[in-house]
Image (tube, rainbow, N blue to C red):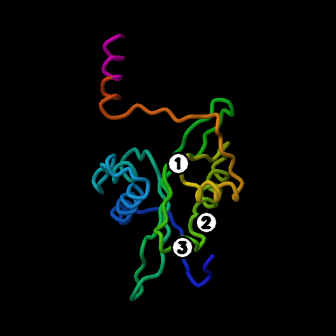
């Protein structure tokens, strides 16, 4: 950890949406998934700060010039539910730290803050996914005590397949 760097964590505010979208874009580049990227500040804002928010975000910022600050990391999360535990859980959708600020403890601090949030809210678990090729992240998560669940596979229906599947389901009622 680089102890010369300082940062602070806080819940995201509407003024952070453009910075979060920029970080999401950086994450898509890192994961080689830019072909899936559709997010804009206008499409994200209502899901974080609208009438019925679907997700929450936490940001990390570092001091900038002349008293300003820069958002250098984010974690976007939402509530899920465990039927077995009969308790809500916290699901981390994405966490990203700008490369220049990796090793400063920001990722660990964000994960610990989210774990604390889950505990404070009385949730039964805190979970997320990691790409199988991201060995650095896998080692990091294991060091923090996370269990990787190799017997589970993520299933997804999206885009045209979702539209088709949803239309077919509605037609068969």
Dominant SS in magenta: helix
> Which image quarter: residue 134?
bottom right
Name the residue at 43% across, 70% down.
71
Whether the magenta-drawn stretch holds residue 166 is answered as yes
Provide residue 154's location: percent of width, then percent of height.
52, 36
**SS for tag 1?**
loop
Which mark lies nearer to you, 1 or 2? 1
Name the residue at 34% across, 46% down.
36
**SS for tag 2?**
helix
From the viewer's side, name the closer residue of 9 and 145.
Answer: 145
How far apart are the alpha carbons under marks 1 and 3?
Answer: 27 Å
Which of the labelled discs sits on residue 131, or is there none? 1
Quarter that holds the N terminus: bottom right
How far apart are the alpha carbons under marks 2 and 3?
Answer: 9 Å
Whether the magenta-drawn stretch holds residue 139 is answered as no
Which of the labelled discs sits on residue 8, or is there none? 3
Q: Earlier in the sequence, mark 1 or mark 2?
A: 2
> Which image quarter: residue 116?
bottom right
**Magenta-colored span:** 165-173
Name the residue at 49% across, 48% down.
93
Which mark lies nearer to you, 1 or 3? 1
Return the residue at label 2: 109
Provide residue 82's location: percent of width, then percent of height.
62, 34
Side of 149 relative to 96 (left or right): right
Name the residue at 68% across, 54% down.
142
**SS for tag 3?**
strand
From the viewer's side, name the closer residue of 151 and 81.
Answer: 151
Q: Earlier in the sequence, mark 1 or mark 3?
A: 3
How far apart are the alpha carbons under marks 1 and 2?
Answer: 21 Å
């Amino acid at each position: 950890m680089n102890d010369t760097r300082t940062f602070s964590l806080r819940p995201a505010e509407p003024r952070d949406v453009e910075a979060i979208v920029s970080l999401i874009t950086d994450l898509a580049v890192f994961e080689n998934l830019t072909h899936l990227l559709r997010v804009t500040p206008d499409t994200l804002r209502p899901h974080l700060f609208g009438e019925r928010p679907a997700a929450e975000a936490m940001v990390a910022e570092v001091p900038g010039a002349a008293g300003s600050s820069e958002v250098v990391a984010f974690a976007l999360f939402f509530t899920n539910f465990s039927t077995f535990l009969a308790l809500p859980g916290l699901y981390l959708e994405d966490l990203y730290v700008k490369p220049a600020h990796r090793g400063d403890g920001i990722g660990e601090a964000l994960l610990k803050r989210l774990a604390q949030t889950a505990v404070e809210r009385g949730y039964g678990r805190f979970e997320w996914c990691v790409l199988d090729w991201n060995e650095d992240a896998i080692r990091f998560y294991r060091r923090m005590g996370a269990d990787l669940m190799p017997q589970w596979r993520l299933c997804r229906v999206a885009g045209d397949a979702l539209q088709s599947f949803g239309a077919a389901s509605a037609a068969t009622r």
